Every structure is written in C-alpha cells, then in structure tokens.
Image (tube, rainbow, N blue to C red):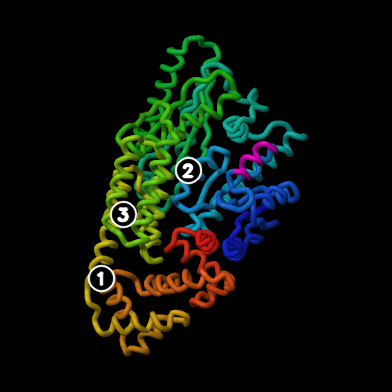
C-alpha cells in the first residue's frame, strides 16, 4: 500500500516516517508534501492508495485539497490530521470523503497503523475483486454488498436485493467490552462469527435480504421488497426482521443489541444515502442508551450556527486550561455539555475526541495513557461526562492545591534546579543523586505539592522559553528545540502543541 504524507510541519512528517517499520507492514511512504498545491501535484504523479493530510496547510488547505480531489475523480483514501478544536474543518473533511481523523498532539502511531491496516485490507480486497472482474467472474457476495453500500452496484444482480422499498439496517452489540469478558480464552472474532452464523440462519428464508459485517462491532442488514407496492407493509416487514434478530441474539447468545433504520429508497444508487441514514440513526444510542431501536430523522448535524457555537465553546475550554483559569474552563465545559446533549448535534466519536483533547492538555503522559485506556469502554454521553468530570476534577484540585501552597525545601530546590538547568538532560536519577533523595519520593512529592508531574513542569518551563526564542526569527525551529533541551524535534512539536494548542510554526505565524 502506497502512502503520501502532506503536512507543512517537517517534524510531523519526520515523526510519521520514523515511528514505524512501514516496509515490514507491507506499506510504503512514497512521498511528502509541505503545502496543498504540492500535495495535488504529487497525488497526480504518485497515485498513492492513502493520503495522510493535515487540515491546515499553506497555499491550499486540507479542505481545498479534498474538494479538488473530488472534482478530479480521485478515490485515494484520506486520513485527516487536526487539532481537536478544528471541529468545523474536520466536519467538512469527513463530508468530503475522509475516512478518519486524528488529533496531532495526542495521535498514537499504533492507532494510525490500525486504521491503515484496515484500509489495506479493503484496498487489497478491491484489487482482488478487480482481478476477478477481468477474468474469473464476480467477487464475493460480501465484497459486492460493501461496494453497493459505497455506490458501486455493478454486481447487484448477484445478490437477492431488488430496487423497490429498499432499507438499510445497522446494528451493534451494547457494552461489547463487558460482553467479551464472558468469553474467557476467546476473542472478539469468536463472538462476531457466532453473530454472523446466526444471522445467516435467521435470514436464509428471506427472499430479498442480505447481511454483511462492516466493522468489529457494526453489522448491516439490507432488505428490499420488489413485489410489494405498499410502503406500510414494507416498513412493517423491516420491523419484524429487526425484532427477530434482536430477540434471537438475546435468546441464543445472551447479548443486547441496538439498531438504526433508514428511510426507504428505491434505487441501488440511493443505497449509500440509506446506509448513512441508518448510521446516523444508530449513533443516537450515545444520547439514549436505553433505547434498542432508532429510526432515521434529520439531526441537522451540519447546522452552521450550532457548529460555530460548539467551536466557540471548545476554544473557550482550551483557553481556560492554557491560561489556568479553571473556573472559566469548568463553566465552558458545563455549557458545552448542556448544549451538545440538548441539541444532540455531535456524533459520538467527535464528543469523545473533544474530551480526549482536553485530557491531553491536562494530564502527564502516564495519566493520559491511563485515562484514555479506561475511557475505551464508555458507551453513552452520561457515562463520558461522569468519567471525564471525575478525572478533570481530580487533576484540577491537585493543581490548584499545589498552586496555593508553599513548597517544602526539597521541592523548592528541585524547582529552582529545573528553572536553571532546563536545557540539560534531567532525569529522576540525576535529581535523586543531586538532592540525596529517592527518585520515586521526589516524583511523588513534587506532584503532591505542585499539582503537576515533574516532567510536566519541566516541559512547561521549556515551552515558555521556546515561546520567547520563537519571537526571534534568526532561530530556526529545530534550533529552538535544541536550545530548550529537546533532542527530538518531533517531541518538541508534540509538547508545544500540547501546551499552546498549535504548532511552533503556527505560533510564529501568529506573532506576525
């Protein structure tokens, strides 16, 4: 699989290239672009399978690139890189066909690799299907159904579906993490195989119904009614199918499921829209976790006024943390949660990424990883809110307590040492030797008294000095990184983004 990286930050490009053995995974970084115009030129020249695209670039930004790609008929898969407050731009990018997005400050290369591996499977399957089309006949039924859901109905006649009163139904397993705990020694694949087999049995006698698994916890049922002219009878049949699947999975596998149902459509060309409707309906489970079934309704997720208000509140939360105005942060957080929950105008993934972005700004690396891991099993808005409020409150209480407290002689000396030696390599072992104390004791006492982890404080000092140095344009950014103690330019960019909410390059641009 061929990958093109487009980002105006050399540090990000270097970090992505050097963070993984791409060749060993069957992937190749075929090129890099530093602006939108260069991206489009390399897209034409290199024809990559996947484009990793920064949302903000000079000459043409990510939205311009995606728009131009659509006009030119390019089908390259696109992964967006953004800051977590670039909400409006990300929404536009997803609408233009991006397959996923990551926040640059907190992105984990393993997560990106995971998405790329899934894309690789899809691309390989499409290539195999293409080869079969050329000589050996039609691809597999699963491949045909997935293609139909993306708008390619070339082999629709190989399925049982017809173009009349056609519905898309999507469903997932509630509390999948907890459910899998019942399968000691087994994995998710075992449960998914059981569901697929049961669906095959339940739907085998249906004349115009197909099913296919789309993701680890997302299944699709497509059903049409070629002989029925009654919309009411077709709708009743869809509901009967949903009840059959729901009750059977509960009876035979003891799992709870939740369903999203589209409106009826009458042509295979409309199937992608029906799938999108079913997905939007299913996503309502995030706000109404006790409901087992949702019908599509227009949630107006693209309402410009609502998205602008959300963007404003996210920016206010971010600024509250940056400026250590914690009451303002808490007020903006409460307002954002109330607004989003009342209008239900954000998708689940977007809500979770906002919480995750705020956590990244507040937490040490260890605390962030731990909090992120524990958040994986959160299924609904109320759970997310309670979980993150508890985390945020603990972190802010510790930070505020440390801010209003006199330090012990040991910690005062450590703070003074860091303030004077931030350019040097500083480790807990070094501090322990310097101050004749246990490194673990210094670490624990430092956080207890200051409200910050020791290396969180060190990074804060370094970034403060870096901001001053960036005002002098004679210093290149990589030189600034070295001058404040960062040996890795990539690490400098990530840490700077964490504390300032923007890259060093963007910060310098704002200075004028």
| x 51%, y 74%: residue | 486
- Residue to which mark 2 is pinned: 88
- Residue to which mark 3 is pinned: 329
Q: Is residue 347 visible?
A: no
Q: Could you say which is closer to the camera, residue 279 or residue 453?
A: 453
Q: Earlier in the sequence, mark 2 or mark 3?
A: 2
How far across and how far down the image is residue 47, in percent? 72, 47
Query: Which residue is the extreme one toward the right?
Result: 135
- In the displayed structure, 397 sits above or below 315; it is below
Span of residues in magenta: 64-72
Residue 367, by quadrant, is: bottom left
How far across and how far down the image is residue 224, in percent? 53, 20
Magenta region includes residue 207: no
How far across and how far down the image is residue 358, in percent? 38, 55
How far apart marks 2 and 3 lie (CA) works out to 21 Å
- Residue to which mark 1 is pinned: 402
How far across and how far down the image is residue 203, in percent? 48, 26
């Amino acid at each position: 699989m061929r990958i093109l990286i487009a980002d105006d930050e050399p540090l990000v490009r270097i970090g992505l290239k050097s963070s993984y053995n791409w060749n060993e995974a069957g992937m190749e970084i075929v090129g890099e672009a530093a602006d939108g115009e260069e991206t489009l030129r390399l897209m034409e020249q290199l024809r990559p399978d996947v484009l990793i695209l920064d949302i903000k670039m000079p000459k043409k930004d990510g939205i311009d690139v995606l728009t131009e790609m659509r006009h030119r008929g390019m089908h390259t898969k696109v992964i967006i890189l953004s800051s977590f407050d670039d909400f409006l731009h990300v929404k536009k990018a997803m609408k233009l066909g991006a397959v996923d997005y990551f926040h640059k400050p907190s992105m984990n290369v393993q997560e990106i690799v995971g998405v790329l591996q899934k894309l690789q499977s899809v691309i390989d399957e499409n290539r195999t299907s293409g080869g079969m089309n050329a000589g050996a006949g039609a691809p597999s039924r699963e491949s045909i159904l997935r293609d139909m859901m993306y708008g390619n109905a070339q082999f629709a006649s190989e399925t049982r579906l017809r173009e009349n009163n056609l519905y898309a139904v999507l469903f997932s397993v509630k509390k999948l993490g907890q459910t899998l705990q019942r399968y000691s020694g087994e994995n998710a694949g075992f449960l998914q195989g059981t569901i697929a087999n049961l669906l095959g049995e339940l739907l085998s006698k249906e004349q115009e119904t197909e099913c296919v698994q789309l993701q680890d916890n997302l299944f699709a049922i497509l059903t049409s009614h070629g002989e029925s002219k009654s919309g009411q009878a077709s709708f009743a049949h869809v509901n009967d199918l949903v009840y059959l699947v729901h009750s059977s999975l509960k009876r035979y596998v003891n799992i709870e499921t939740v369903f999203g149902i589209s409106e009826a459509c009458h042509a295979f060309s409309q199937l992608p829209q029906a799938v999108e409707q079913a997905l939007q309906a299913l996503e309502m489970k995030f706000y109404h976790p006790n409901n087992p079934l949702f019908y599509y309704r227009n949630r107006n997720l693209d309402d410009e006024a609502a998205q602008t208000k959300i963007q404003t509140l996210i920016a206010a939360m971010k600024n509250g943390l940056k400026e250590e105005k914690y009451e303002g942060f808490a007020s903006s957080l409460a307002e954002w949660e109330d607004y989003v929950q009342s209008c239900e105008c954000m998708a689940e993934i977007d809500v979770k990424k906002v919480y995750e972005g705020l956590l990244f700004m507040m937490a040490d690396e260890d605390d962030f990883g731990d909090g992120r891991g524990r958040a994986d099993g959160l299924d609904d808005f109320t759970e997310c809110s309670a979980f993150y409020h508890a985390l945020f409150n603990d972190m802010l209480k510790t930070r505020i307590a440390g801010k209003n407290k006199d330090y012990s002689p040991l910690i005062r000396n450590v703070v003074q040492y860091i303030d004077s030696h931030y350019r040097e390599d500083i480790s807990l072992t070094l501090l322990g030797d310097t101050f004749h104390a246990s490194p673990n004791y210094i670490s624990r006492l430092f956080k207890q008294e200051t409200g910050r982890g020791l290396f969180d404080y060190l990074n804060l000092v370094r970034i403060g000095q870096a901001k001053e140095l960036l005002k002098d344009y004679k210093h290149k950014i990589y030189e600034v990184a070295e001058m404040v103690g960062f040996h890795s330019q990539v690490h400098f960019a990530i840490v700077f983004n964490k504390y300032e909410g923007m890259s060093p390059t963007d910060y310098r641009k704002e200075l004028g």
